Image (tube, rainbow, N blue to C red):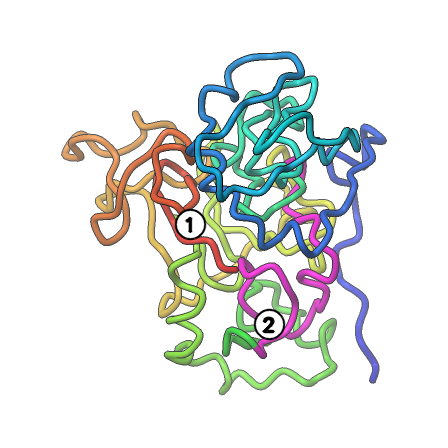
Amino acid sequence: MDVPRPMLRRGLSRAQRSGASRAAAPRAAIASPWPALVSAFAIALGACGSRDIALDDPSDPAIGDARTGDADTGPDAIRTDAGGCLAGQPQCANGCDDDLDGTTDGADPECTSGRDDDEGSFATGIPGDNMDPVKQDCFFDGNSGQGDDGCQRHICCLLDDPDCATIYHSPPFDPATCTAAPQACIDACAPATPPGCDCFGCCTECDAAGCVDIYVNPAVAPGCDDTAIHDGTRCPTCTKTTSCATPCGGDTCILCAGQAPGALPSSCAGATCPGGGATCTDSTACPSGDYCANGCCISVIH
């Protein structure tokens, strides 16, 4: 099959520019019950140093330090690494500012879910995730392909580029396919879609200069990061699939990624969340199995 090359190959992610090496999370770590661990050990997140924290529940497995390879030091002990991060957890769920941009985990616009293992770019750091530049599926489920989510959309249904059909021509683009997302896709993907995004990775991203809808899939926009959201050559603009999207900004009173609370209208009595969901400052405030993104608890797909 003639798979076209992505049209945007300019620039490198912040992690690539700094030469940082990010280890891809093994598949087993993707299904890790991190929200429960984070909730149980919130006190560990604000401190530094390597230390053991005893668990009260004897049914919890003993876990060693996954980053350093240290063996477990006692029954039901969990180690954090020298920076105070929860060991063995994805970067976007370990309680640390891994890319040193001043934001942590779900407060970082480049964290797309609690399974995201790359806090320094819109890539997820999950092997095999979001690899196809043409056929887009649920961006937030940790894999490529529609088999487990019922979502499939040609990239040209999303990108605003008038030359999209020429660049991404295999399979050919049929505008008639740009219809509402199937209900199976909505049921599977919408609960895990952060405020401001559609199910396919078209997201509203904001900074001091304003907000813009950009496509964040690194298979299409490998040079896009939160420093380049207004650079259309690195972060292409897109049109959301509104049938499978979570709104943000304006009268929704829901914060978009990177948006300050003061940017919401004065009629908003503080930030709210889609469907009346719980607000949060970090994932410790969310129910087990949820993840804090843009101040709202959202589901994690396992």
* 167 relative to 25, above or below: below
Task: Tell me the quarter of the picture where residue 5 sits.
Answer: bottom right
User: Where's residue 36, x and y in %?
Assistant: 45, 41
- Residue 249: which numbered mark, if any? none
Kindly identify which residue carries mark 2: 156
Q: Nearer the viewer, mark 1 or mark 2?
A: 1
* 134 relative to 109, above or below: below
Mark 1 closeness class: few <14, some 14–19, many ≥20 residues within 10 Å: some
Residue occupying image coordinates x 49% and y 59%: 301
Mark 2 closeness class: few <14, some 14–19, many ≥20 residues within 10 Å: many
User: What main secondary structure does the magenta stretch of the protein show?
Assistant: loop
* 256 relative to 190, above or below: above
- Residue 289: which numbered mark, if any? 1
Upstream in sequence: badge 1 or badge 2: 2
Residue occupying image coordinates x 74% and y 57%: 127
Q: Please say whether residue 65 is one of the residues in the magenta stretch.
A: no
Badge 1 vs badge 2, beta-carbon distance below 8 Å: no
Tell me the quarter of the image containing the N terminus.
bottom right
Q: Nearer the viewer, residue 157 or 279?
A: 279
Task: Tell me the quarter of the picture where residue 185 sits.
Answer: bottom left
Q: Is residue 227 left or right of residue 201?
A: right
| Residue closest to the far top | 48
Residue occupying image coordinates x 22% and y 34%: 265
Q: Is residue 109 left or right of residue 56?
A: right
Residue type at the position of mark 2: Cys
Q: Is residue 70 left or right of residue 50?
A: right
Residue type at the position of mark 1: Gly
Tell me which segment is drawn in magenta.
Answer: 119-147
- In space, the residues marked 1 and 2 are separated at their CA atoms by 33 Å
Q: Nearer the viewer, residue 188 or 256?
A: 188
User: Where's residue 277, x and y in %?
Assistant: 25, 47
Residue occupying image coordinates x 52% and y 64%: 200
